[in-house]
């Protein structure tokens, strides 16, 4: 079935994309306004795009009345934010922070979550998250009603017992227990169903073909 995104209604394009581009990692973004009010919300139009500099990005849609969501407004104002990744143990708390509270409400306090200080940016990180990326704005890219927020990562916190080897920067990724967003509203996936496919060199590929 072909769906033509140049003629389909935007809400239909949205449904098709969020139902098929899965699983998506979730950026649980903490930001602050200029007065220091802390804000947190999840964004699953999210990924990492480069390694030098490390740039991550997420897409923030508008509020129903068209204004910027608080996360995007804060980042436009202050240029700093923290992307926390979401472990299964914190999914319920994350869901509370997605409630459409008015600006100025501290979603982390509402959800009973713990703020931990960041090292290089003002917004705190979420102590219940095993990975927190401290970011400064790299670029804000308008995309229709969305604002794509690109952040340069200036530091990452990884939970101590999830670091296998500090010198080699080896992380025990399964132990992070992260979840991803699936189709539709309210569906998630665990990252426990893994399998390995070793990468092949040209020589290995040729040898494999010759053996078949
Ligand atoms: C798992 C999850 C993922 C979400 N992803 C997005 C997203 O990618 N873009 C977006 O605009 N809203 C997304 N939302 C909705 C926002 O979290 C919600 O609108 C929130 O109230 C925005 O808060 P803020 O105004 O404090 O930034 C998501 C919600 C959930 C539960």
Image: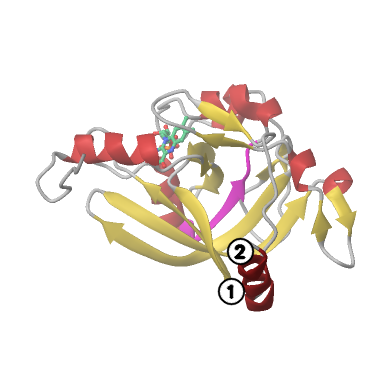
**Residue in the image at 46% along x and 40% along y:** 22
Tell which of 118 and 26 is nearer to you: 26
Q: Position of residue 202 (x, y in %)?
A: 63, 77
Checking the image for residue 164, the label placed there is none
In this view of the protein, can residue 26 be seen by the observer? yes
Q: Is residue 63 left or right of residue 49?
A: left
Disc 2 residue crowd, few under 14, some 14–19, many 20+, Cα 10 Å: many
Tell which of 117 and 82 is nearer to you: 82
Which element carries disc 1, helix, strand or loop? loop
Disc 1 residue crowd, few under 14, some 14–19, many 20+, Cα 10 Å: few
Q: Is residue 114 left or right of residue 202?
A: right
Checking the image for residue 53, the label placed there is 1
Q: Position of residue 54 (x, y in %)?
A: 59, 68
**Residue in the image at 88% along x and 44% along y:** 161
Ligand 1's quadrant is top left
Q: Is residue 61 left or right of residue 11?
A: right
Mark 2 vs 1, N-terminal side:
1
Checking the image for residue 153, the label placed there is 2
Q: Quadrant of the C terminus?
A: bottom right
The residue stretch that appears in magenta: 78-86
Q: Quadrant of the N terminus?
A: top left
């Amino acid at each position: 079935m072909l769906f033509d995104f140049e003629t389909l209604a935007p809400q239909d394009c949205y449904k098709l994309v969020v139902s098929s581009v899965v699983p998506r990692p979730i950026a649980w973004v903490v930001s602050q306004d200029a007065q220091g009010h802390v804000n947190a919300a999840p964004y699953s139009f999210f990924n990492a795009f480069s390694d030098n500099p490390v740039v991550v990005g997420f897409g923030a849609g508008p509020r129903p009345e068209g204004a910027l969501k608080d996360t995007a407004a804060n980042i436009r104002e202050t240029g700093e934010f923290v992307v926390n990744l979401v472990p299964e143990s914190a999914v319920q708390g994350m869901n509370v922070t997605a409630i459409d509270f008015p600006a100025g409400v501290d979603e982390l306090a509402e959800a009973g979550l713990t703020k931990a200080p960041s090292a290089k940016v003002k917004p705190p990180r979420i102590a219940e998250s095993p990975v927190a990326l401290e970011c400064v704005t790299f670029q804000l890219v308008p995309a229709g009603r969305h604002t794509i927020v690109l952040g340069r990562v200036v530091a990452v916190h990884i939970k101590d017992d999830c670091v296998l080897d500090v010198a080699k920067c080896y992380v025990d990724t399964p132990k992070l227990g992260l979840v991803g967003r699936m189709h539709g509203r309210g569906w998630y996936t665990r990252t426990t169903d893994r399998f390995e496919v070793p990468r092949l060199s040209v020589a290995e590929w040729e040898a494999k073909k010759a053996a078949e």
